[in-house]
């Protein structure tokens, strides 16, 4: 697929940002650290250019004085490498001050005073970048520092008569412009950060309200269905635990949690006379009872927020060998989260008293689960389930 022109800057910056790992949890520090990393890389590039130029002069013109310049160029890589490492470790402000000061002092000390006015364009880079990686007003401070160094050098070297006030004015004009732009950007960033925090809090509040509502529904279902108290929470927690072991993502775990809470919500549509019957159900009553999975689907599907959680309420009564309901789905065609839940649901149901039978012993329940592996239950799920049960026992 052909790339559009405005895709390139984003891809280039993403590639560069991926190379730079700033060790911080503060997104503002990370952003400034990546800008500073770009500046340090530019300094590396400038020094490499000067080094190549000096090598060329030595090779072609045989000027002995340039041997010293060559050594200076090579030594310059040491502080630049140090700046890069410090920046990566998260010392962004300290590194920024050090790198900018180093850039200005290296240019001042490494050039003759009478040529310093021509370096004002070079000074513009560290002065401008300081507003974005330290604080907006930093450009004014470093412009003042540069002007003082230029003025003192001119006086000491006797070049005050060549003093270029226009270059200094231009430098301060640039400093003021970068201060103004950086200040506006900082204010905009702060507003955006505040807005993001507000939105995140609102999203958390909404999610908490949804989760509380779902838990309320599940508790109401337990009361109506005469379920053992805590059944829904137990099977939800254990299902989530097995799902983590089987590699589900964080987002998938959220949907599994919701689906497990609402696994029997379809029983809202089952008459009490069938739901609370103490003895075995007739074939007709069983057929009615089995409609609760479809009722769950009909109830939840219109709620877009809960559609991703439909799998467990819809498929948790399917069996590995295809003899379950509502669709007779078998094997790996049954969604994995439903296969996990089926084991946990049966285990918990058999482990507690019900109106029509007493609880089984843990050993008897485990033997039943093992015997149904490959028939009712997915053998892989049973294997991990048994490992977790043994771990609990230990």
Image (cartoon, helix red, strand yellow):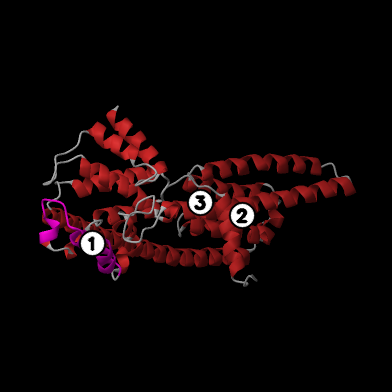
Prevalent SS, magenta region: helix
Is any part of residue 146 visible from this angle? Answer: no
Q: Which residue is mark 1?
A: 287
Q: Residue furthest top?
A: 394
> SS for tag 1?
helix
Q: Cα distance, mark 3 to mark 1?
A: 65 Å
Residue 45 position in % (x across, y down): 68, 52
Give yes or no for contact between labels 3 and 1 (Cβ–Cβ under 8 Å). Answer: no
Residue depicted at x 35% and y 43%? 242
In the rendered view, tell whether residue 261 sits above or below residue 372. below
- Quadrant including the C terminus: top left
Q: Is residue 249 magenta?
A: no
Residue 266 position in % (x across, y down): 22, 62
Residue 29 position in % (x across, y down): 45, 51
Residue depicted at x 31% and y 39%? 369
Q: Earlier in the sequence, mark 3 or mark 1?
A: 3
Instruction: Rate crowding at label 1 as few (under 14), some (14 to 19) or many (20 or more) other CA atoms within 10 Å.
Output: few
* Numbered range of the magenta stretch: 273-301
Q: Which residue is mark 3?
A: 33
Say which of 281 and 217 sits in front: 281
> SS for tag 3?
helix
Q: Is residue 293 magenta?
A: yes
Q: Earlier in the sequence, mark 3 or mark 2?
A: 3
């Amino acid at each position: 697929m052909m790339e559009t022109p405005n895709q390139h800057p984003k891809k280039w910056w993403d590639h560069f940002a991926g190379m730079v790992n700033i060790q911080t949890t503060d997104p503002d520090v990370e952003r400034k650290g990546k800008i500073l990393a770009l500046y340090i890389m530019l300094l590396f590039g400038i020094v490499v250019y000067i080094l190549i130029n000096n090598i060329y002069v030595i090779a072609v013109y045989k000027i002995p004085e340039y041997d010293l310049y060559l050594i200076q160029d090579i030594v310059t890589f040491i502080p630049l490498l140090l700046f890069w490492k410090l920046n990566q470790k998260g010392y962004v402000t300290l590194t920024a001050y050090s790198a900018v000061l180093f850039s200005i002092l290296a240019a001042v000390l490494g050039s003759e005073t009478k040529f310093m006015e021509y370096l004002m364009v070079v000074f513009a880079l560290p002065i401008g970048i300081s507003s974005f990686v330290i604080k907006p007003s930093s450009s004014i401070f470093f412009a003042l520092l540069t002007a003082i160094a230029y003025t003192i050098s001119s006086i000491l070297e006797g070049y005050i008569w060549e003093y270029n006030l226009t270059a200094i004015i231009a430098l301060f004009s640039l400093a003021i412009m970068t201060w103004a732009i950086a200040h506006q950007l900082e204010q905009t960033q702060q507003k955006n950060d505040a807005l993001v925090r507000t939105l995140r809090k609102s999203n958390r509040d909404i999610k908490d309200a949804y989760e509380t509502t779902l838990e309320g529904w599940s508790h109401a279902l337990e009361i109506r269905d005469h379920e053992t108290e805590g059944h829904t929470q137990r099977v939800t927690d254990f299902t989530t635990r097995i799902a983590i072991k089987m590699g589900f993502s964080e987002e998938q775990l959220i949907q599994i949690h919701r689906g497990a809470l609402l696994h029997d919500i379809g029983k809202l549509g089952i008459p009490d006379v069938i739901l609370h019957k103490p003895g075995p159900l007739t074939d007709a009553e069983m057929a009615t009872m089995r409609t609760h999975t479809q009722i769950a689907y009909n109830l939840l599907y219109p709620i877009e927020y809960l559609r991703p959680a439909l799998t467990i309420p819809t498929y948790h009564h399917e069996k590995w060998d295809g003899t379950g309901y509502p669709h007779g789905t078998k094997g790996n065609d049954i969604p994995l989260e439903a296969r996990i839940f089926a084991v946990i649901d049966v285990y918990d149901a058999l482990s507690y008293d019900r109106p029509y039978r007493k609880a089984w012993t843990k050993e008897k329940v485990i033997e039943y689960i093992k015997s149904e592996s490959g028939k009712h239950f997915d053998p892989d799920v049973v294997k991990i389930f048994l490992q977790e049960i043994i771990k609990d026992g230990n």
